[in-house]
Image (tube, grey):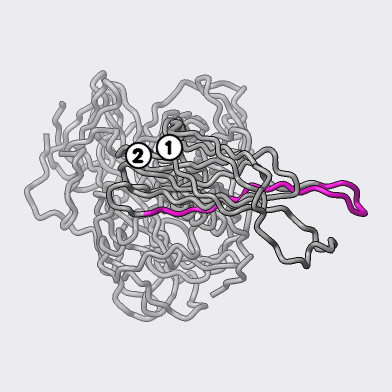
């Protein structure tokens, strides 16, 4: 067996001299590289020819890639060297592609859409079509996104394993799923499939030592996962739990307890009467009070109900006003009636304690403005017709309005996140030429 | 292993396989052919141009349960590029090829002639043009022709099943299946050879003894 002598490992980089300009060039993937575009003069050299025949002279002004040729970086655990750089355009937008090489890994791609970087590889298995979806070898399915659209090479420098040329055109069809885009590129003799995984913000910049880009989601890439998606799911779960809890509490808490009920009489157009319901106990856990009045014998008349719930110990008073009324008549539209004879008032946040409910009752006859009596001074009837009024006090129960307000508050965050997610998705899947942004 | 001396330069040469007829001398690059009359030098062949392939003669690897060792290489060139074909000697004495192009690997074994039903084989035999996209069945797998090119030998080394005189050239047809299988059909003189196999990553070949390069860490799978 012949073991290799322990000589120094050879370098993968070979120095060449450009046939066109005489500049010194590095050949970084000898044996694989077919075309080398001189970084000094832009001439395309044939590296399969020992004479480095010039295939094409520069047709475009030289540009410097953001990541210089020969840069090395570690991307997701693999060391890569930048050996080639292409700029391509689909007519609507431009993007850059770095050809990455590692002698043990072969080739990879770093794609820069100007905003974010993706990490690309050729697929060595053809994807399968399942309806309109594409299924790649790991079983993941992708949705059709766009194409076929033409893509053209606008600028090229460095070395490539094929006959690269400015103006080279392919037809591209894209399929997407969050985080990944699979592209089919075809020309008349070849069809290749590649997969591009969106890199996290800063990953490529850190790997190749270029300036960090600031995250922005204003014009997302087609395969970009919505940054709001996880938060949306989270907020919907939290929101649903909160809403459910609130409703359960509302249902449990709505079992109200009758505290007191008493019948009184108001004098129609008589003097205001003051009546009292004594000893209303409000325990610590129930602070909501509902005072209901019922006066079914009103006839074109009303009862003013002034309530004062007075703490027997502190004399602190909680005041409320109720109005029981009933009117009827007839006009050009026919007979009518209106008014609520059973008004409810609610008091919330009543501290626990023992209370008296003081009620001032004043019943009045309604005089239409069409009546001559309308202009007569009202007088207090010394012998008024009695109007029965039943006052009922309940404690506990939820205020529907509060429950609704609670639900609205709970919905604010999920709603906001949904709106952000939705607008992101709309921008992501947006018509490619909708913004007309051709920089 | 069988040791001998190069009939041209006298250097020691080794034969790992007892079946292969050709050995390229590591020192003088003479092609030495084994025959009943003994070892005969048939003249010099081109030295393989320097490349950055991680493979080299002596690399060991595995194809499933079978282990192999690389014992020879042919470097092919065509108008738009080149590739290596490494001859692998398996532990059962059989041989296969590891094709290496664009940093990707194909593990191929010769299959017996698939007969006149194979349109590509027929076209090659009859000297007709092979059409891209032609479909053929090889060992119950459906392949499509993806590339047709004229391959010119750019250099060779080690032990080989055929001689590679200067200017040695042959038509070569690449085929691909949907499921990662690939095949190659070549015509050498009057014989058409069919090779079928699959794409493999370098890691899948479980290689040891890979070539080291300055500044590049040896991958974990080759440790």
Measured Cα–Cα span from mark 2 to mark 1? 7 Å
Whether residue A75 appears in magenta in the rendering, the answer is no
- Residues B64 and A403: in front is A403
Q: Residue furthest left?
A: A6
The answer to whether mark 2 and mark 1 are in CB contact below 8 A is yes
Q: Position of residue A166 (x, y in %)?
A: 52, 69
Which range of residues does the magenta coloring cover? A317-336
The numbered mark at residue A39 is none
Q: Position of residue A149 (x, y in %)?
A: 63, 57
Q: Position of residue A167 (x, y in %)?
A: 57, 68
The numbered mark at residue A395 is 1
B119 in relation to A197, above or below: above
- Local secondary structure at mark 2: strand
Crowding near pointer 2: few (<14 within 10 Å), some, many (20+)? many
A251 in relation to A351, above or below: above
Q: Chain of mark 1?
A: A
Residue sitting at x 72%, y 66%: A377
Crowding near pointer 1: few (<14 within 10 Å), some, many (20+)? many
Which SS does the magenta portion mostly show? strand
Question: Dot 2 corresponds to which residue?
Answer: A282
Quarter of the figure that contains the N terminus of chain A: top left
Q: Residue furthest front?
A: A382
Q: Chain of mark 2?
A: A
Task: Quadrant for residue A14, please give it.
Answer: bottom left
- Residues A391 and B63: in front is A391
- Residues B170 and B136: in front is B136
Whether residue A327 appears in magenta in the rendering, the answer is yes
Q: Position of residue A198 (x, y in %)?
A: 40, 53
Residue A393 visible? The answer is yes
Q: Answer with mark 2 or mark 1, whichever residue precedes in sequence.
A: 2
């Amino acid at each position: 067996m012949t073991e290799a002598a322990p000589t120094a490992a050879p370098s993968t980089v070979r120095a060449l001299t450009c046939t066109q300009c005489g500049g010194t060039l590095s050949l970084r993937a000898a044996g694989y590289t077919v075309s080398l575009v001189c970084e000094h003069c832009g001439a395309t050299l044939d590296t399969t020819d020992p004479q480095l025949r010039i295939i094409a002279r520069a047709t475009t002004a030289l540009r410097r890639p953001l990541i210089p040729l020969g840069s090395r970086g570690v991307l997701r655990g693999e060391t890569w060297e930048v050996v080639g750089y292409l700029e391509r355009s689909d007519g609507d937008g431009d993007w850059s592609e770095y050809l990455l090489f590692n002698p043990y890994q072969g080739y990879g791609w770093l794609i820069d859409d100007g905003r974010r970087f993706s990490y690309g590889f050729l697929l060595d298995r053809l994807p399968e079509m399942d309806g309109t979806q594409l299924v790649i070898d790991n079983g993941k399915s992708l949705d059709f996104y766009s194409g076929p659209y033409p893509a053209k090479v606008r600028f090229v420098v460095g070395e490539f394993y094929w006959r690269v040329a400015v103006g080279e055109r392919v037809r591209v069809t894209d399929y997407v799923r969050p985080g990944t885009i699979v592209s089919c590129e075809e020309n008349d003799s070849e069809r290749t499939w590649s997969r591009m995984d969106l890199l996290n913000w800063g990953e490529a910049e850190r790997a190749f030592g270029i300036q960090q880009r600031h995250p922005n989601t204003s014009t997302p890439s087609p395969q970009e996962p919505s940054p709001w998606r996880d938060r949306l799911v989270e907020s919907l779960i939290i929101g649903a739990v909160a809403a459910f809890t609130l409703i359960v509490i509302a249902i449990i808490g709505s079992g109200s307890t009758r505290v007191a009920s008493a019948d009184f009489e108001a004098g129609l157009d008589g003097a205001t009467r003051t009546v009292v319901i004594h000893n209303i106990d409000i325990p610590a856990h129930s602070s909501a009070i509902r005072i209901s009045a019922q006066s079914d014998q009103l006839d074109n008349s009303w009862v003013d109900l002034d309530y004062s719930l007075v703490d027997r110990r502190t004399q602190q008073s909680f005041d409320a006003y109720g109005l029981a009324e009933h009117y009827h008549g007839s006009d050009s539209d026919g007979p009518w009636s209106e008014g609520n004879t059973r008004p409810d008032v609610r008091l919330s946040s009543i501290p626990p304690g023992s209370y008296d409910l003081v009620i001032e009752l004043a019943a009045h006859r309604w005089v239409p403005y069409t009546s001559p009596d309308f202009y007569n001074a009202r007088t207090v009837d010394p012998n008024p017709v009695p109007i029965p009024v039943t006052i009922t006090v309940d404690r506990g129960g939820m205020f529907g309005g509060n429950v609704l307000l609670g639900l609205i508050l709970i919905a604010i965050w999920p709603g906001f996140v949904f709106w952000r997610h939705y607008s992101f998705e709309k921008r992501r899947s947006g018509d490619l030429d909708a913004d007309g942004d051709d920089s | 292993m069988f040791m001998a001396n190069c009939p041209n330069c006298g250097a020691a040469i080794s034969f790992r396989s007892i079946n292969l007829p050709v050995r390229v001398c590591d020192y003088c690059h003479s092609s030495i052919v084994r025959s009943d009359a003994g070892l005969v030098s048939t003249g010099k062949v081109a030295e393989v141009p320097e490349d950055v392939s991680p493979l080299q003669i002596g690399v060991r690897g595995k194809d499933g349960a079978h282990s192999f060792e690389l014992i020879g290489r042919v470097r092919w060139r065509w108008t738009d590029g080149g590739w290596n074909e490494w001859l692998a000697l398996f532990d059962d004495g059989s041989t296969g090829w590891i094709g290496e192009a664009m940093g990707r690997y194909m593990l191929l074994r010769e299959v017996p002639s698939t007969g006149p039903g194979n349109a590509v084989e027929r076209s090659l035999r009859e000297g007709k043009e092979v059409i891209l996209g032609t479909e053929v069945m090889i060992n119950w797998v459906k392949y499509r022709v993806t590339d047709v090119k004229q391959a010119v030998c750019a250099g060779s080394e080690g032990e080989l099943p055929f001689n590679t005189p200067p200017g040695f050239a042959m038509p070569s047809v690449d085929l691909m299946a949907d499921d990662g299988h690939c095949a190659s059909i070549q015509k050498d003189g009057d014989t058409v050879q069919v090779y079928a196999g699959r794409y493999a990553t370098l890691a899948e070949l479980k290689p040891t003894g890979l070539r080291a390069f300055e500044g590049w860490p040896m991958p974990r799978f080759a440790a």
